[in-house]
Amino acid sequence: MDMKKALPHTCIIFTAIILFITGSMTGAFAIGEFSIGINGGVTYDPNHLGPYIDYQNRQWKAGGGDVSQMDTPYAAVAGFSMRYQFNYFLFRIGFHYATPLQDIKGEGGGVKYTIDTYQASLPATIGLILPLRKRTYFFLGGGLTYHYAYMNIKADPGGETRFADAIAGYHFMVGAEVPVTDDITISSEWIHQEGRSIPIEDDKGSGTKYTINVKGDILLFGINYYISM
Amino acid sequence: MMKRGILTTLVILAIFTPSALTAAPVNGALTLHGGMMPSLGGNLMSYEQGNTFGSTTGIDGINNSASGFDTSPVERLLGASAGITFKTTFYEYFHLRVGYNYFRSVYGGTGKTVYNDGAINRSLKCEYSMWGYDIPVTVGLTIPFWKDMKISFSTGLAYAYGVYTYKFKTDVPSEYEGEFKGWALPLVIHLEGEYFLTRQLALFTSLSYYNGSTNVLADRKQDDDAANKDYASIDFTGYRYNLGVSYYFKPI
């Protein structure tokens, strides 16, 4: 990663951590709560490969012959989060990792394609809580996200290209949370994220450049534990 | 194969989940609703639009102008929908929704533009349209607040079937017609609010977001041997706004 990209990325992570710590410190004077959670869910089209896959499929179909189309993938998502909340505000940092449930494979014009991709994200969120009862909330918020996105495209015959980079982006989220016990809740949320890299050069040295777009939607279900303070 | 597997799982869940919930404190509600769908079908891109008319972004890129040509904008489709939803609420906070929505384009998609045919510009009349239906299955959380409100947030998948058609008429004259039919399993995020007029009757409003599209489909209007056979996918991604009325089988 060059300095031009490293600087904004470092600033974003640093700002996120400062915001979280500042929020937590400020909250020490209010009635606040800490919680940690694990979550899992699903997303469609990680790293926004859909337009590329669609374009490739259309070209194959228009070219005639036997075609086995590539599917735009669904991906499993898993991660964890830490949250501090007081009054009507929440501060949250988290991590989630998304990778397709199946390999992306296709064949057309005598060429076999295999695409391998994943995305790791660190979202830092500031949000509002609508408390309805004890541990019963609607929440919505937004913030900055630090992504690491990877994709490897293998064409046989043809060779391999690989693009990977850290990407700064932003996200919005909305969700709901209800209690299971006094300290444990379950939550459901939707995260919409946006962000794209600058054109990245192929790691394999072909000279090809590609812009990774991390635009997407993530559905998450979580289990959260409130730490007594 | 993966889509069929997911679909089978959805059907099994839809059949067996209600019976598994019979031991839980359960209420049911039926909602009739109608609404609108901005940007129905997305940019409606197809191979032929890129190959012949120079648009790599479908309906967005088809809009052009040139001096001496009478043009009018070809806008993205606005869809209208009508549907019915059955919702089971259980253990106070949780719910499962199964619905049926019929939708079709009611505005946009027609206009006159210009394309470059080799060295000369030509006039092009465009007509895009789309209709279809979907069956969303979502699970989520319901939170009652005040005495007469409920807000629900749920996520899941939908079986979505769509038919996308277009007609392009040039001043050569020549006509291009395309029709694409297919299904997909878009992700669904659903947020709804209900205001109770009585203990069983509520006004309903919702916002849903779908994300998913079909594979690339072959044009059904052309013979297999036709040189200008076209290829496109049907995109179900977009927002849906609904208004309606809910009836709960038991008083809340």
Image (cartoon, coloured by chain):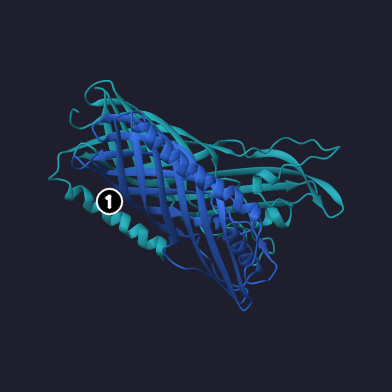
Between A162 and A88, the one nearer to me in the picture: A88
Residue B237 in picture, x, y percent from top left: 50, 46
Residue beneath disc 1: B14
Residue flagged by tag 1: what amino acid is it?
A: Ala
Q: Say which chain is cyan.
A: B
Quarter of image, res A182: top left
Does A93 appear above or below A162?
A: above
Q: Residue furthest bottom?
A: A157
Query: Image quadrant for the N terminus of chain A?
Result: bottom right
Q: Say which chain is blue.
A: A
Is residue A36 found left or right of B92 in the rendered image?
Answer: right
Residue B116 in picture, x, y percent from top left: 81, 50
Estimate how packed mark 1 is, as few (under 14), some (14 to 19) or many (20 or more) residues with alpha carbons within 10 Å: some
Is residue B205 found left or right of B175 in the rendered image?
Answer: left
Query: Image quadrant for the C terminus of chain A?
Result: top left
Between B248 and B24, the one nearer to me in the picture: B24
